[in-house]
Image (spheres, grey):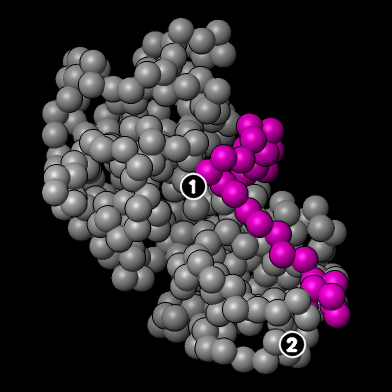
Amino acid sequence: MSDTFKAIRIDKDDEKQKVNLVELNENDLMEGDVLVDITHSTLNFKDGLALTGSSPVVRTFPMIPGIDFSGVVKNSDSDKFSEGDRVVLNGYGLSESHFGGYSERARVNSDHLLKLPENINNKQAMAIGTAGYTAMLCVLALEDHGITPTDGTILVSGASGGVGSVAISLLSDLGFNVEASTGKLEETDYLTSLGAGSVIDRSELSEPSRPLGKERWSGAIDSVGSQTLANILAQIKYGGAVSACGLAQGMDLPSTVMPFILRGVSLLGIDSVMAPMSARERAWKRLSSDINIQKLEEMVVETSLDKVEALGKEILSGNIRGRVVVNISEE
């Protein structure tokens, strides 16, 4: 690669946000001790928010969006990494305060990088991406709470999205019976192919209901938030838990303390952005052994940098199924 490279850049002028595909050079990059040739990125719900300006994800302008990437180290001033190392980065301020993954090159802090497991290639790493890594954190949280397949069914909300799709695959392969909640019942065949044992319409959970309902699930993974999360909590079995990792419906939680004090339900907050490196290493190690590559490939659609902006609008509208891998350059 030459010293110039392509990137998507978000600029803001007079409160209006503009997204352009531009050509930059290495002097335009932010500070860091590792320079990476990016091979792949991905499209997450948060990326859609950044690209459209629908939510103040971007804190500094101009900004290269993209909250994750995989790539190959070009050069390193850190003894942790060497030229040629295959690496992945999720979160840590990418697309918020530090240039992100929608670029052919990135300069980042070595403390934020993780070497990819040998059995996961760069494209697969972004097929997993932040969504899949978050799903794994959610599964680990349920396991740490002591929930096992014999305890009962696990609900996955936002099931046809990135987090939901990977969560269903992981849970079913671990032996859990999974119920999927979706607003797209036409995707039932897709969800059952990933391992869902049953599928329900999200409308069952999206409207106000009683603060405590019938005990239905031993645990849940929720990426929706708001009323949906409140209704899930109200129907978790005694001693169960919910891994909460998203707010697609909203950031409010119109619940009561009743599930917590009458049934001992636990709400497990999942932060994938600033999770410590030990948690990241644990998640990627488990992904390297647990992820079903065949199912993963069935979730994926591929795109290129010049099409990312339009897809950002689609993911916010709920029109994206599974995972979107952005091909930046060849490995």
* Residue at the disc numbered 1: 130
Above-or-below relation of 191 to 20: below
Element type at mark 1:
helix
* Residue at the disc numbered 2: 212
Residue drawn where x is 72% and y is 51% of the image: 140
**Separation of residues labelled 1 and 2 (CA atoms):** 33 Å
Considering depth in this image, is 87 or 20 the residue closer to the camera? Answer: 20
Magenta span of residues:
259-288
Which quarter of the figure is the N terminus placed in? top left
Kindly identify which numbered label has been placed on residue 88: none
The location of residue 302, given as percent across then percent down, is 30, 51
| Comes first in the chain, label 1 or label 2 | 1
Above-or-below relation of 119 to 243: above
Structural crowding at the residue carrying mark 1, measured as other residues with C-alpha within 10 Å and reported as few (<14), some (14–19) or many (≥20): many
Residue drawn where x is 45% and y is 37% of the image: 93
Front label number (1 vs 2):
2
